[in-house]
Image (spheres, grey):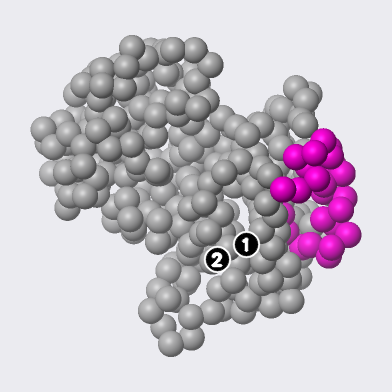
Amino acid sequence: MLHAHLSPGPLPSRMQLTKDGKLKHFLTIEGLPPLLLEEILDRAEQFVTLPNKQQKKAPLLRGKTVMNLFFENSTRTRVTFEIAAQRLGADVTNLDIRTSSASKGETLLDTVRNLEAMNADMFVVRHEHAGAAHFIARYCAPHISVLNAGDGRHSHPTQAMLDMFTIRQKKGSFQPLKVAIVGDVLHSRVARSQIHALTTLATGEVRVVAPKTLVPAGIEKMGVNVFHHMEEGIEDVDVVIMLRLQRERMQTALLPSEREFFKLYGLTEERLQLAKPDAIVMHPGPINRGVEIDSRVADGMQSVILEQVTNGIAVRMAVMSMIMGSQGGAA
């Protein structure tokens, strides 16, 4: 459905922003100014306690229609976007691509045009091909905003921002922190977005820890330090972010076995002791227990994995409200 020429390529930040610098689309963190990322985090603070209040909704998007276009399965991400939109008072439609005409050969642009005719205001797009959300943003009607919910190996900006929110919630300022991102960096859209967010927010040190076969060439240019030994890579860090092993995106056998990967790079209680005593453990999910992380660590006192899920709703509410605000639809 998508062709090679639709890859995102260099994305000027102005494509995501209105003329006055507000968020029009949210496609990638790359190129966005630090103040805008901080605004997302500050806005999320306002929403994170909403479920505990008597009034559980903030109807900033009443009368708006959000369409979830998930061309790739991800129940948890889709549900959190759906809850976020509903708490903002929007009408939400989930398009099941497997039963839609898109699965019968309709082009992506045809699908978009038909959905535009249904008076959509926002598309939340998840697609296996890098650049799908960018393509839709480039060719959709001017009044529609596009939010990237993950495209191929390229980007997953709201996941990175909910991770940033969780880190700030637990650690405060980013500047003094050492953060280690561990695992399958090569195939991870989450890792790329995390690196852009962490460096944009002036994090003290960002480390990538992985076998050589799972590290993209030239990743040092993104402002990270690369380690190939787990023990060295997580020593004295404040935050350990474990990545899911992206088996479905591997083209060749880049690992001898999952058991060998866990032996060399799995996060165990013993390895975690190398990090700072108050280090937090994160994982974008879903977790492969015994592959990336030991269950005792995933369920342990230093784990904030379930808090990441909770914070994801608040962060997605923040992004949606800011985007709709730039369209004149929110306060």
Tell me the quarter of the picture where residue 208 sits: top left
Q: Which residue is mark 1?
A: 320
The residue range painted magenta reads 99-123
**Measuring 45% from the left and 29% from the top, which residue is drawn there?**
246
Tell me, for residue 84, which label it has, or none: 2
* Residue 6 seen: yes
**Measuring 65% from the left and 31% from the top, which residue is drawn there?**
130
Residue 210 vs 164, above or below: the answer is above
- Disc 1 crowd rating (10 Å Cα; few below 14, some 14-19, many 20+) is many
**Measuring 42% from the left and 18% from the top, which residue is drawn there?**
214
The amino acid type, in three-letter code, at marker 2 is: Ala
Residue placed farthest to the bottom in the image?
Answer: 54
> Residue 93: x and y, percent?
69, 63
Give the spatial CA distance, label 2 vs label 1.
8 Å
> Residue 190: x and y, percent?
48, 38
> Residue 206: x and y, percent?
37, 32
Q: Earlier in the sequence, mark 2 or mark 1?
A: 2
Tell me, for residue 147, which label it has, or none: none
- Disc 2 crowd rating (10 Å Cα; few below 14, some 14-19, many 20+) is many
> Residue 71: x and y, percent?
66, 42
Q: Nearer the viewer, residue 93 or 24?
A: 93
The amino acid type, in three-letter code, at marker 1 is: Met
Residue 263 vs 65, above or below: the answer is above
**Measuring 75% from the left and 22% from the top, which residue is drawn there?**
4
- Give yes or no for contact between labels 2 and 1 (Cβ–Cβ under 8 Å): yes
Q: Quadrant of the N terminus?
A: top right
Is disc 1 placed on a helix, strand or loop?
A: helix
Is disc 2 placed on a helix, strand or loop?
A: helix
136 left or right of 195?
right
Q: Is residue 29 magenta?
A: no
* Residue 179 seen: no
